[in-house]
Image (spheres, rainbow, N blue to C red):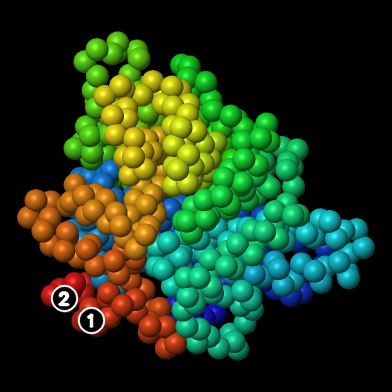
Amino acid sequence: MSLALFTGCNEWLYLEPEDGIIRQEYWMSKEDVHASVMGCYASLLGNASSGQGYSIPELLFLWGEIRADMIYLSRSNPDFRYIIYGDILPDNGICRWNAFYRTINYCNTVLEFAPVVMEIDPSFSEESLKIYQAEVRALRALMYFYLVRTFDEVPLKLTATKDDSEEFNIPKSSRSEILNQIKTDLEWAEQHAPITYGNLAADKGRITRYAINAIQADVCLWADQYNQCITACDKIINSGFYGLLENDDFWFTKLYVTGNSSESIFELQFSPEVLNPYYRLFKDSKYLRANAATIEEFFPSDPNALPDSADIRADGCSYKLSDNFTIWKYVGRNREEAKPSNESFSNFIIYRFAEILLFKAEALAQLGNTDEALQLVRLIRRRAHASKASDLGLSTDKRSITEFILAERCREFAYEGKRWFDILRIAKRNKYENIDLIIEMVTRSAPAEKQLTVQNKYRDTLSHYFPIYYMELQANPALQQNNFYKDCLLYTSPSPRDRTRSRMPSSA
């Protein structure tokens, strides 16, 4: 099947009935609808044999971390190296968005075909239909939220792609239009999503009402809508469904190895049958490690602390010092021992309760309610045994408290795909009042000989979003390259990896 919006031959847009999506003659029963919605969730886990580039789980990590300061490139990979060196061009595989649009199309297909099943299967109730619609509208909103934060303006496609006869020349939609659609989808979904499915894995791996509230809080914070963010957070906090896991000997195992803990709100559900890609990325191939310089800054040693009272999020959680700073959350069987590769089925956490507390703290700080904000941060720090050396100093102005919360997020969500988005969200406020946060961050991760070049590029705020992948531009004439990359020239060759790369324009 050919679809111009995404790339040339996109066989992934056409699923056979057993995969649960697309074919009109397939939509005959409530079981078909259920299978189709489960197909939407399955698509989040990726398909290593699809030949379509990086999977969603890989991109959730890479989009949130590769431009930030928490990782170190320990083995050459062209896509990784060019981004860390500030040489981002439209042929970089990390800039491919097709995996996200694949899931979006699955969601659109459910929304289009599921209502028809009510006319065919009398046992399929309107209540069940609305629950399924709520799930896929929230998933679609989540996919677009990642896209708009990564690329800024992207095509907003709300209808299903069903056959080759459809033509797609869809231009980009504005940031405000995309965010408005995200909010509309989430508001509708919140009214119809269940609080629980009566099953632990489903409650953590499917969209619930509180998962929707978590996305809403994140979106509102990105949009500088602080009161709305607090409202969404309070719905979760006051639900009684979630809490911080106790700091005990099994904290790491419960949160990151077993997964689906009482702290979790929404996780990608891996299994022995569907392994995650992180073991290969961090342990087998060893492409990426924890950045020792950043670790030292955000996890400072406390000479007066006892060995068993160190920050539980540091060595043996976020990274493993004795294993040469291996990123540990996805490869550790426990805090000391790595698991074998065939046990690489730790879930990827999208949202958990600790983040809701820090979302609210950040919103409160922006509204000037610094005392309540700090109380929430200290809940997180007490659970973690955070070092006194990383505590807030004497300055209590809004900027200092905001940076304190940002640093706490760095410690709490290290390597959970959050860091770049956190920095960008805070830096861009008030017309990039805090752009220095981005400059400092990219300087920490760039090699010494590239630091000045990287600094100059990131001072241009247009560089904070990825370019549109070159094949998307070739396939869809209505698309225009993001402004920062319009003058980037690439020599044509069968593979983008083999092309001679041009330099960024000197004005960048």
Please determine whether, in this image, residue 12 is positioned above or below residue 404.
Answer: below
Please determine whether, in this image, residue 258 is positioned above or below residue 201.
Answer: above
Q: Nearer the viewer, residue 442 or 339?
A: 442
- Left or right: 226 as drawn, with respect to 491: right
Does the residue at mark 2 contact the one at mark 1 (Cβ under 8 Å)?
yes
Please determine whether, in this image, residue 174 is positioned above or below residue 33.
Answer: below
- Quadrant occupied by the C terminus: bottom left
Q: Is residue 437 visible?
A: yes
Q: Is residue 280 visible?
A: no
| Quadrant of the image occupied by residue 425 | bottom left
| Quadrant of the image occupied by residue 485 | bottom left
Q: Nearer the viewer, residue 136 or 75?
A: 136
Residue drawn at the location 17% of the way across and 59% of the way down: 455
- Left or right: 228 as drawn, with respect to 371: right
- Quadrant occupied by the N terminus: bottom right
Secondary structure of the residue carrying tag 2 is: loop
Residue drawn at the location 33% of the way across and 55% of the way down: 427
Residue 296, image x, y percentages: 22, 32
- Left or right: 77 as drawn, with respect to 348: left
Tell which tag, 2 or 1, sits nearer the viewer: 2
Q: CA distance from mark 2 to mark 1?
A: 10 Å
Q: Nearer the viewer, residue 478 or 201?
A: 478
Q: Amino acid at mark 2?
A: Ser
Residue 222, image x, y percentages: 46, 56
Secondary structure of the residue carrying tag 1 is: loop
User: Which numbered marker is on residue 507?
Assistant: 2
Figure disc tally: 2
Residue 61, image x, y percentages: 39, 50
Q: Amino acid at mark 1?
A: Asp
Q: Which residue is mark 1?
A: 487
Residue drawn at the location 58% of the way across and 52% of the way down: 228
Residue 441, image x, y percentages: 24, 49
